[in-house]
Image: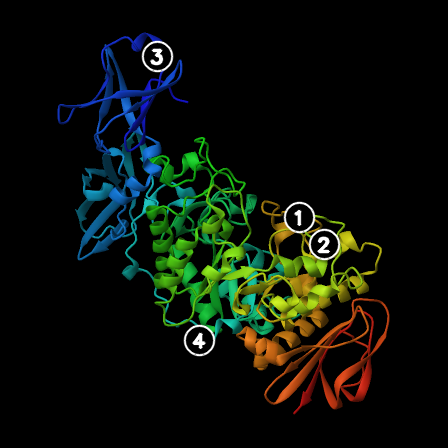
Amino acid sequence: METNIAWIDDVHLLTLNTNNISFLLDNKSPVIYWGKKNKCFPLTINEKISESAVIFSFSDVLPMGETLELIWGEKSFPIYPRGIVRTQWFDENFSANEEILGAYSKNDTTYFSIWSPLATSVILYLNNMSKKLNRQEKGIWTCQINGNWHGFSYEYEVTVNGETIRVNDPYAKSMLANSEKGVVIDFSKTDQITTKRPAIKDLQDAIIYELHVRDATIQSESRVQNKGKFLGLSELKTTTENGYSTGLSYIKELGCTHIQLLPINDYARVNELEPENYYNWGYDPLYFQSLEGSYSNFPNDPISRINECKKMIETFHQEGLSVILDVVFNHVFVMEQSSLEKLVPGYYFRYKEDGSVSNGTGVGNDLATERVMVRKLIIDTIDFFLSEFQVSGFRFDLMGAIDIETMNAVVTRCKKEPTPIMLLGEGWELSTSLPSHKKATSKNSNQLLAVRYFNDFFRDSLKGNIFNTDDLGYVNGKGRYLERLAHLVTGSSLEEWGDPLVSSVEQTINYVECHDNHTLWDRLLLTNGDECDDIRKKMHQLATGIMLLSQGVPFIHAGQEWFRTKNGIENSYISGDEINQLDWKRREKEEKNINFIRMLISLRRRYDVFRLRSKEEIKRRIHILHVPQPVFAYTLFGNDEDFSIYINPTDENYEVQLPSPGLWKIEATNDDNKVIHNVVGEYFSVNPYELIVLKKAR
């Protein structure tokens, strides 16, 4: 705790921290002195906390962003705002929702605007010039410079709480390499995305493919020229040496509708000038509206990274693929080094009642999304990527640390777009200092019907609890959790089959693997190490197949379809390319399984009955079949055809009865030994570890 400072902790409360207050208590009454106005405010001692701290009360409302002193006898102490910034009073008096923040050019003039209500001085440093900003209402500081300063770097010198520091603009739209300075961007002078977002009738039709920009093309076998870069994902018709598709062309062939990119905004831990020596997933955010420089061929060219990213998105659109951005609005890399903390100390982050920083995210800090100007930063960022980069969705990291009101504000903004925008996130309950009923968790999904949630119940039921490496699930535990399967395939939203995870079938994201934790293949090596590779591959196929055939939106981790491994590394966020890169050699070897996944994706996209939109439709069209346990089977009643799906998680054969006699065509099976194409009659055999889909015309 800094001493010899008086802190404004509430509208009418002041806390003095000093080395020893005993000698002061007999002196004359303390006052607050406002030098600019030559004005004094009387103080009353409210409580003596200790020999080094005392709390005062006062009736006046103190000005923010002014030089104030506590005068007590012959002693004087600087007064700085502290807890006051986290009060409702502060938000009511200093929120500036309608202001345009950042730097932008218009009509041969460049405008600069920054929010720092506590600052007593703000100076702009642009190229080789400096200019003082003028304080406006609500703590906004502005200035304008003649000329269009597109491409020039800038920073601010800010005096806050008696300290003068250099700080970058948190609204900077691009940066010099390694976030050295912000850069003015006139987006009319950047490349434009001219191909519209791919049309999608309903978001329930989506199939998501999670991808890290660098992982996708960094391996030499990808034979992509711009390896590990934005531009690498804009190259088409790339193949391995043996002619197997790689990169974007491969993803297009797979049949997914949306590519979800791990964070592409400016993040820490990677030296952008030497990216080959560093690796990071991107969950250490620095600047939310500037792109990560290590994904650019020219990291010191702040305009190039914008154009290269736009080229990538344009190519995705041309190939019929939508883009979802992974966004991290729950924390920053290091709070104390963040521009947000430097500009308005104590405001942007959550604190506990005892004054300590909340750490529900587990990385040292939690963004206080419930505060007006934090919410504004989030909405402004969402608006920016929707408008300028034409993305089609956002995946919210640790969404349980975000408040419901903010997420609903995101929904409101996204509904203004002409095409539906996919919103999804992690709805786990976190111990952040926000009341549980205000968190955007899956438990509160009834208040966020336009938001989808990662279904960890789905994941753990199929392969075992991820926090217990000995735990088994349905596919690797010979049918364990069989009783949960009906709940999973019907969208985890019907009370008939258990406690609903979400309020609507349109809110579940079904997955068995993502960038976090062990890949499914590595998990099976842990839980079923005594089995041969062929059996483990069958188990893997069952899990991925159930995910693709269940109600809800399926989510595939890049490379999952060819049994992606990270050599047993559970948390590979800094593990380097050798562990994280997509292995295109492995892709060649597993073409047979990839074809099985393509087949299931194609089936899902062709028939609406795999993509039902309501609980009522699910109840009407899905029937769970009575079959020998632990085989699980169900029928889907379509308009012109019916489907029956059978899943056998054991090494035994089972004879099962079809829901009706007749001619059933085999649409998909993971059993390579199945030589028949049709089943005629009423009975047939489900082979060990087989997933089979049968279709019968009405």
| For the residues bearing labels 1 and 2, Cβ distance under 8 angstroms | yes
Amino acid carrying label 1: it is Glu
| For the residues bearing labels 1 and 4, Cβ distance under 8 angstroms | no
| For the residues bearing labels 3 and 1, Cβ distance under 8 angstroms | no
Query: In the drawing, does residue 407 fall left or right of residue 160?
Result: right
The image position of residue 212, as x and y in percent, is 55, 56
Q: For the point 42% across and 64% down, which residue is it?
A: 391
Element at label 2: helix
Residue at numbered disc 3: 21
Q: For the point 55% across and 76% down, which residue is it?
A: 616
The numbered mark, 3 or 4, whose residue comes first in the sequence reads 3
Kindly report the distance in space between the C-alpha atoms of the residues bearing marks 3 and 1. Answer: 53 Å
Category of crowding for the residue at label 1, using alpha-carbon neighbours closer than 10 angstroms: few (below 14), some (14–19), many (at least 20): some
- Whether 383 is drawn above or below 139: the answer is below
Category of crowding for the residue at label 2, using alpha-carbon neighbours closer than 10 angstroms: few (below 14), some (14–19), many (at least 20): many
Asked whether the viewer can see residue 173, the reply is no
Residue at numbered disc 2: 522
Kindly report the distance in space between the C-alpha atoms of the residues bearing marks 2 and 4. Answer: 36 Å
Q: In which quarter of the view is residue 529 placed?
A: bottom right
Closer mark to the observer between disc 2 and disc 3 = 3
Q: Quadrant of the N terminus?
A: top left
Kindly report the distance in space between the C-alpha atoms of the residues bearing marks 1 and 2. Answer: 9 Å
